[in-house]
Amino acid sequence: MSARRGVATLVGALLALGVAAPAAVAQDGTTTTLPGGSTIVDVPAPGTGSDVVGQDPSATTTPGTPTTGTIPEIPASSVPGGALIDGPDRAELAQSLAEATTETGVCFGYEIVVSGSGLGGRPNADRVSSGGPDRTPSVGSCSRGSLTLDVSLNYTCSSCESEDSARYTVRSTVPGLSGSEAKRRLERLTGLDEKALLGDDDDLALRNATAALPLLVGGDPATPEAQATVPNGDRLTDKPGSDWLRANGLDALFAIVVLIVGSIVAAFGWRAVRAERRREARRAPRRPSPGTGPSGASPSSGGPPDGPTRPDDATGATGSPGDAPSAGDATAPAPSRWAPLPPADPPPAPHRDEDPPTP
Amino acid sequence: MSSRCKAWTLLLGGGFMALAALLAVVAAFGSVGGGVEGHVKAEYRASGTQNGARTFTSDKRVDEVVDDITDAWKPADRLADPGGVFLRYSDVIVAVRPRKPSGTDITVDDADRAYARWYPVVGGWFGTYSGRAEGFRGGGPGSGK
C-alpha cells in the first residue's frame, strides 16, 4: 500500500510538471471529453483548485494561495503536440506565459477546438496556459485575473461546398479590460484574423496571438542582449524584398493601370474632338456666306483660282498668319472657298505671302 | 448627348483619370526614401541611440504603435512575444516594447545587429537558431511550416 502511495506521489509530481500521460492524469486531474471523442486533461496547478473546461474558472476554482505563474522548466520533448502547435513549442509558449504571469499577476493561455475533416491525426482540441501545457488559466493563482484566447476552427471536406471557418474570442477577467477590447487590441498587435488561423501558418498565428496576450496588460519588456554578435554562427535568413513594393506595390500598380486607361480614354477623346472639328470645317464652306457668291472653283481642286476672286476679308483684314480663324469656330468668318481643306488641322492661313499680288 | 459633347467628355474624363493616377504614382514614389525608419522618426520622439540602434518613445500603448507602424509600412515578418512585438523589414528590425509604467519604447536597428540584440526572442524566427525554436519556423519570412 505504501509502495502504491509512493507511485501515486511520483505520478502527482510528474503531473505538476505537466508531462504526465492522460491515463495517469485521470487519477488527480479532470478529464473532459470533447465533441469528436478527444479529451482535454485538466490538471490542477499546485496550490489551486481544479478548473473545468468551458466554465468560468472563477465559478469553479477553489481559491488557493495566490501564486505566481512560474512553472518548472518543462522538458520540451515530453510535451505532446496540440491541434496546431507542436509539443516543444507548446512547452516554450507555456514557459514564456508563466514568466509574464510572474511579472503581471495575470494568467494567460489559449484553448482551441478543431472540428471537421483533415486533422491528420492531430488532436482536435488542446490548451496551453501560464500554468503549463494542457492547463486552464487559473484565476485562483492570478491576482489580477486571466486572459484566454478561445479559438474554434472548422475544416470542411475538399468536395464540400461550404468553406473552412474560424472563430476566436478573448475571455477576460481582468478588471477594466473587456473581452471585446482585448480582442481588438490583439488584432492590432498581431494582425490576427480568421484567414491567418486557416492559412499555412496557422500555428504561428495561434502562437503569436497567445504570446501577445501579456502585452494587453502591460507586458514584461524584453531586454536587449549585451552581446553584439549572434552566437554559434547563427544568422538572419531569407532577406525580405523591397519594403516599398510591399507597402505600395498594389496601389502603385493600380495607379499605373488607371493612368494607362485614362490616357487611352483621353486619346480617344482627343481624336473624337479633332474629328468633330474636321466635320464642322467641312460643313462650313457649304454654308452660303454673305458677300461670297458661288464660283466655278471646286473646294477640292486645290490651290486658289486665278484672278481677283479672293475677298480681302477671307483671312481677316488685320490678320496675320497666326490669326487664321479656326475651322471649328462658329463665330469666325467662313474660310475662303478655295482654301484647301487638309485632313487634320484647320487650314493653314498664310497664303497672302505666297499669292501673287492682286492688281 | 451630341457627338461633340461625348468627345469632350471622353477627353476631359480620361485626362482627369490620367492626371489623378499620375499624382498617385508620384506620391507613392515620393515615399521611397523614408522607409519605416523615416515614418518612426516623423511620428515618435527620438530618445537617443543605444549601441548603434535608434530609440524612440511614445505615450501610446504598444498595440496602437504597432498598428500605426504596420499600417504605414507592412512588415515582411512579425513576431509577438510577451516582451514586445518585433517587425522585420528589408534592412531593419523594429522592436516595439512596453515601457514601465506606461507608454512604448521603439528601437530601430540594422537587421543583422538587431538579430544579435534580440536573439533570445527572435532567434529561430527571423533566422537560424542553435536552440529549440528553429524547428518551429525554420527562419525567415514566408518560410512557414
Image (tube, rainbow, N blue to C red):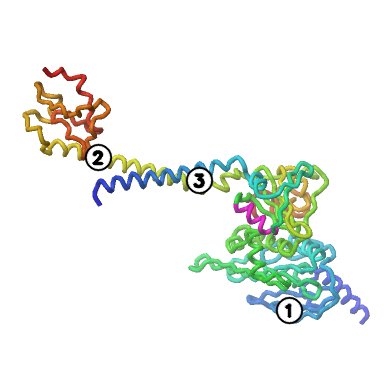
Marker disc for residue A275:
2
A308 vs B36: above or below: above
- The residue type indicated by label 2 comes to Ala
Q: Is residue A130 magenta?
A: no
Q: Report the Cα–Cα distance between label 2 and label 3.
A: 34 Å
Mark 2, Cα crowd under 10 Å, few <14 / some 14-19 / many 20+, is: some
Q: Which residue is mark 3?
A: A252
Q: Quadrant of the N terminus of chain A?
A: bottom right
Q: Position of residue A321 (x, y in %)?
A: 25, 25
* Chain to which mark 1 belongs: A
Q: Report the Cα–Cα distance between label 2 and label 1.
A: 82 Å
Which residue appears at 71% of the width and 54% of the height? B58
Circle 1 or circle 3, nearest the eye: 3
Secondary structure found at label 1: loop
Q: Is residue B65 magenta?
A: yes
Q: Position of residue A346 (x, y in %)?
A: 24, 32
User: In front: A170, or A321?
Assistant: A321
Marker disc for residue B88:
none
User: In front: B14, or A118?
Assistant: B14
Q: Which residue is mark 1?
A: A52
The answer to the question of whether label 1 and label 3 lie on touching residues, with beta carbons closer than 8 A, is no
State which quadrant residue A6 falls in.
Answer: bottom right
Q: Earlier in the sequence, mark 1 or mark 3?
A: 1
User: In this orientation, does residue A227 appear?
Assistant: yes
